[in-house]
Structure formats: structure tokens, C-alpha cells
Image (tube, rainbow, N blue to C red):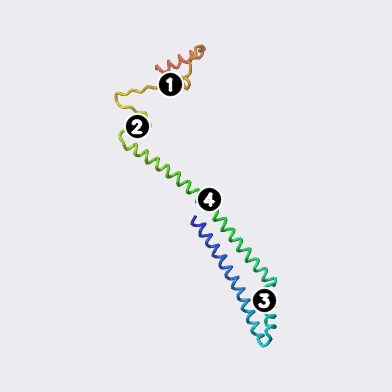
């Protein structure tokens, strides 16, 4: 995110510098018009105003000035649009990181609660019994199967002669 902000700041600085130089050029033209107007100070006041207006119009409405100003505007708009895109992207990253942070905080709270439960003797025993298949001395284990969910298959009553021979052969092998 820091890189995006640095890039956005750099683009903003460049567009500001470009705008500064464009304004500097315009000020230069205006000052040159004033100098030209001062040269004609011997003329009447109306003539000075006409000449000044004529020079200003000639420079401001020249094709070169219009093209330069148009390019300046296009470059500034482009940099503003790029900055806006980066702003939108950083906002998305910010919201995503906020959501991720909230999830992580919930996980940490859950882990701390579980750790607090395990630190008690009763909680530790429950954790060990759930995690590992162990019992204390003198305890037994009873396994209850639900009839509907039983994984034990029914025994077939119609076993073929080859299957009986195979069962007998396995029994002989195991007894050796």
C-alpha cells in the first residue's frame, strides 16, 4: 500500500510541476505583452489598448498556445484519473484487510478461550479424551452403533463353496 501511495504522490507532484510551468509560460507571455505595450507609450491611450489587445489575442488564440494548453489539460486529467483509480484500489484493499483483520481477531479470541478451557484440570482431561483415544485405569469403553447409520454389513447366508474354501485357506495360513 505504501508503494501505491508513493506512486500516487509522485504522479501528483509531476502534474503539479507541469501545471506550474504552464502557468509560468502564460505569465511570461503576459509580461511580454506589457513590455510591448510600454514601447508604444508615445501613442494615444486607445492605440495602446488596441495594440495590447491585438498582441494578447494573437498569442492566446494562436494554434501553438491552444495545442499546448490542450495537451496540458489532457495530461492533468490523465494523472487525476490514474490517482482516482489508485484511490479506489487502495479503498478495496483497505476494506479487504479490515474484514481479514476482523476474522483473525475472532480466531484469536476463540483460541484464547480454548486455551483458557484447557488450562483447567477438567478442560485438560476433556481435551485429551477428545484428541486421543485414551481412558483412565478402571474405565471401559462402550461403542454404541445406531441401527440406521451402522457401518457393519449384514452377514450373508449364501456363501459359495469357493468362498468357504478361501476362508478355510486363510485360517490355515494364519494358524501357521
Q: Residue at x 34, y 36 (%)?
A: 118
Which residue occupies the foreground of this view, 171 or 147? 147
Do the CB atoms of the residues marked 1 and 3 lie less than 8 Å apart? no
User: Does residue 78 sit above or below 33 in this rendering?
Assistant: above
Q: CA distance from mark 3 to mark 2?
A: 91 Å
The residue where tag 4 is placed is 92
The residue where tag 3 is placed is 56
Residue 32 rendering spot, x and y as whole percentages: 63, 79
Which label belongs to residue 126? 2
Image position of 96 (left or right of 28): left
Mark toward the viewer: 3 or 2: 3
Which callout, 4 or 3, points at the residue further toward the start of the chain? 3
Q: Quadrant of the C terminus?
A: top left
Residue 55 rendering spot, x and y as whole percentages: 68, 78
Label 3 sits on a secondary structure element that is helix
Which callout, 4 or 1, points at the residue further toward the start of the chain? 4
Q: Residue at x 29, y 25 (%)?
A: 137
Which callout, 2 or 1, points at the residue further toward the start of the chain? 2
The residue where tag 1 is placed is 145
Which callout, 3 or 2, points at the residue further toward the start of the chain? 3
Do the CB atoms of the residues marked 4 and 2 lie less than 8 Å apart? no
Q: Residue at x 63, y 80 (%)?
A: 34
Amino acid at each position: 500500500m505504501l508503494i501505491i501511495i508513493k506512486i500516487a504522490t509522485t504522479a501528483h507532484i509531476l502534474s503539479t510541476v507541469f501545471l506550474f510551468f504552464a502557468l509560468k509560460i502564460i505569465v511570461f507571455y503576459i509580461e511580454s505583452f506589457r513590455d510591448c505595450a510600454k514601447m508604444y507609450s508615445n501613442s494615444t491611450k486607445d492605440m495602446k489598448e488596441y495594440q495590447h489587445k491585438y498582441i494578447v489575442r494573437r498569442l492566446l488564440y494562436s494554434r501553438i498556445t491552444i495545442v499546448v494548453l490542450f495537451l496540458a489539460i489532457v495530461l492533468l486529467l490523465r494523472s487525476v484519473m490514474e490517482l482516482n483509480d489508485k484511490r479506489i484500489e487502495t479503498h478495496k484493499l483497505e476494506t479487504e484487510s479490515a474484514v481479514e483483520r476482523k476474522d483473525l481477531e475472532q480466531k484469536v479470541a476463540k483460541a484464547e478461550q480454548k486455551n483458557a478451557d484447557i488450562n483447567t484440570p477438567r478442560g485438560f482431561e476433556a481435551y485429551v479424551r477428545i484428541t486421543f483415544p485414551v481412558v483412565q485405569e478402571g474405565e471401559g469403553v462402550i461403542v454404541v452403533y445406531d441401527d440406521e447409520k451402522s457401518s457393519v454389513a449384514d452377514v450373508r447366508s449364501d456363501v459359495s463353496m469357493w468362498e468357504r474354501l478361501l476362508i478355510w485357506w486363510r485360517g490355515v495360513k494364519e494358524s501357521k
